[in-house]
Image (tube, grey):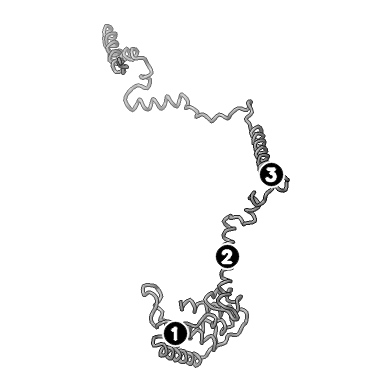
Amino acid sequence: MALIFLSQLRNLAAVHRKYGEILDNAAWLRVNANIWSSAPEGYIGSRRGDRAPLYFGLTFENLKNQALACGLDASDEEIEEQVADTRAWRRKRSEQVGAPFYRRMKPDKIGRLLGVVEATREEAGAWNIGTYGGSRAERIAAAKERDKARKAHQRRASGVQTREERYAVNLTKSRPWVDEGISRRTWERRRSRERAENDAAASATYSVHPDVTQPVPPQPNPRPIVERDAAESATFSLIGLPPQDFRKPTRQRALERTDSLGLPDSEPKDFANEFSEEAAEDVPHEIEIEI
């Protein structure tokens, strides 16, 4: 938490310098020294990262680096004096309470010492630092208003309607039948009748004309016969058969087969019949089942 305070103090000093304001070295050194001494001294951070662990504590080096980051033109003597004064004050308070005293300066006191106004605080984003002339209750109320405006903007961006927009379409709130001088039930019957008439008119307008033909999807074009014959010839040549053998009847193929083998004239008929019978046996027959 102390590192957050130190970061906000640097941002606050940058905003002050942006508008040409002169920073009070004594007040800024006092506030920064108080924050640096508001926690036990020691190394913070992980040793596994690229950066070395930071030694947190009120030292001359830490306070000087913070003064340079804030843009203060404080000398080394002023810084050493402030470190000594803050350590003496912490030691005295620890003796009074009987325990180490690490309480930080209150936000309202920081804002009063540094002369912080609400506009500067908001621009710097120093939400943990108070303002000059303000109170904690006022800061809480302002924070609620900012949160309310932020959430309303998010709702509008996501499409959520406002209360006025919802009431504009809400019949219970708008009460259009009162303006027409009729009851709500009569107004609803008339609206239902108008809706039915509008639906019927829309159906008649968009009906399909009987003379209009529906589009036919495109059909795939068959391959030419020459290409199919060439493909079949290539297929039959791979299995060692003539390309036109399977297009002829069984008897004709048997006769041509006998002629190619050079059999006598008396054998082709029997051979053809035998071949046709064998070919017929390969054809599956339907089986009739009696129930």
Query: Sequence order check: which comes first, mark 2 or mark 3?
Result: 2
Above or below, 29 relative to 272: below
The residue shown at (62%, 28%) is: 212
Q: Residue 148, percent across and down?
A: 57, 65
Three-letter code, disc 3: Ser
Label 1 neighbour load within 10 Å: few <14, some 14-19, many 20+: many
Query: Sequence order check: which comes first, mark 3 or mark 1?
Result: 1
**What's the CA distance linking mark 3 and mark 1?**
76 Å
- Viewer-nearest residue: 97 or 239: 97
Three-letter code, disc 1: Ser
Query: Sequence order check: which comes first, mark 1 or mark 2?
Result: 1
Q: Quadrant of residue 122?
A: bottom right
- Viewer-nearest residue: 193 or 179: 179
Q: Residue 73, percent across and down?
A: 55, 87
Q: Quadrant of the C terminus?
A: top left
Above or below, 52 relative to 242: below
On the image, numbered disc 3 is attached to which residue?
183
Label 3 neighbour load within 10 Å: few <14, some 14-19, many 20+: few
The residue shown at (58%, 30%) is: 215
Above or below, 46 relative to 263: below
On the image, numbered disc 1 is attached to which residue?
37
**What's the CA distance linking mark 1 and mark 2?**
36 Å
Are dots 2 and 3 in contact, CB under 8 Å?
A: no
Q: Quadrant of residue 254?
A: top left
Q: Nearer the viewer, mark 1 or mark 2?
A: 2
Q: Element under label 3?
A: loop
Q: Residue 263, percent across and down?
A: 26, 11
